[in-house]
Amino acid sequence: MESGKDVEVRQLRCLVAIVDEGSFTDAAIALGVSQAAVSRNLASLERGLGVRLLRRTSREVAPTPTGLRVLAHARRVLGEVEGLVRTATSGHTGLRIGYAWSALGRHTPAFQRRWAQEHPGTDLHLVRRNSGSAGLVEGVCDLAIVRRPLDDRRFDSAIVGLERRLCALSSDDPLATRRSLRLADLSARTLLIDRRTGTTTPELWPAGSRPAIEEIHDVDDWLNGISGGRGVGVTAESTAHQYPRPGVVYRPVRDAEPIAVRLAWWRDDPHPAAQQAIELLTALYREG
């Protein structure tokens, strides 16, 4: 047999029981199986791993140095299996929703509260990941809040709402005294953008009147550059709610098209709660 193949949960249970109970006989009693079954499972595990796990004497059974390391891993694996069984049998599941910069802006607290009230059997976790898929590709979330279309046929998405575009600028910028701005007001400025996740590109402006571009790496870099007067930003209004910052003001850009807020998921593996999340988010954005 090739080393490392055919390791089974029952073999790990036998190893842990032998060590915890102190003998093959007591392990068999604890597991409710025959002593021969315990011996067979341990032998199969040692054969599959290609190592000796236990040292047997007439007085005791003790782990070898390698056995101690395997035993520690076995306990963790069995703990994970027990957790999986509890989740499956209790119906209690989790829902991880990823986002790149801002989650849902001012709707975030309401979404969390109403989800907990309406879906108490599904724990909600918001996960920030500054990537184009907001964590879907990386496997850190089940659904993702994105504000630009995912150009990838592996994903599906649904628009749940619209957000205004705002300009973020230094509080001592002369434009900060205005109640709202136009795109043309920003043509002579430097626009700070994150090409991986940003919702604004130079193409938002007409050719010939586009602002200069400086690339940044994340929202903190973006805010620091704006507060320091290095440039301005144009973003979804959710950013203003999630990231108020001394030295930075947000003003509506009244001639810029709104940004569509989408909920995205793997096309071939949608989360069971995806439709409920879409419905609740759509209701929250509709309520304003």
Image: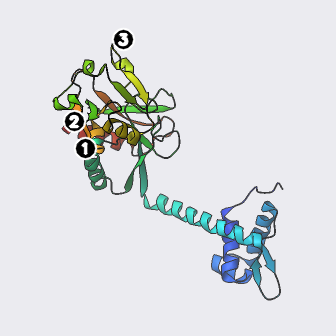
Furthest residue in direction top, as rendered: 208
Where does label 3 land, which residue?
207
Instruction: Say few, some or many: other residues with alpha carbon within 10 Å of mark 1 (under 14 / 14 to 19 / 20 or more).
Output: some
State the residue at coordinates (43%, 55%): 93
Spot occupied by residue 89 in the image (x, y as percentages of width and height):
47, 61
Q: Quadrant of residue 100?
A: top left
State the residue at coordinates (21%, 29%): 174
Sooner in the amino-acid sequence: mark 1 or mark 2: 1
Q: Quadrant of the N terminus?
A: bottom right
Residue kind at label 3, given as amino acid type:
Ala
Q: How many marks?
A: 3
Mark pair 2, 3: CA separation: 34 Å
Spot occupied by residue 133 in the image (x, y as percentages of width and height):
47, 36
Sooner in the amino-acid sequence: mark 2 or mark 3: 3
Mark pair 3, 1: CA separation: 34 Å
Name the image colouring.
Answer: rainbow
Q: Which mark is residue 286?
A: 2
Residue kind at label 2, given as amino acid type:
Arg
Which sits in the foreground, 195 or 58? 195
Side of 70 where 237 appears, left or right: left
Q: Quadrant of the C terminus?
A: top left
Residue kind at label 1, given as amino acid type:
Arg
Q: Which mark is residue 106?
A: 1
Side of 148 where 3 appears, left or right: right
Which sits in the foreground, 280 or 203? 203
Secondary structure type for disc 1 = helix
Q: Is residue 53 above or below residue 242?
A: below
Tell which tag, 2 or 3, sits nearer the viewer: 3
Q: Is residue 182 above or below residue 44?
A: above
Instruction: Say few, some or many: other residues with alpha carbon within 10 Å of mark 3 (under 14 / 14 to 19 / 20 or more).
Output: few
Tell which tag, 3 or 1, sits nearer the viewer: 3
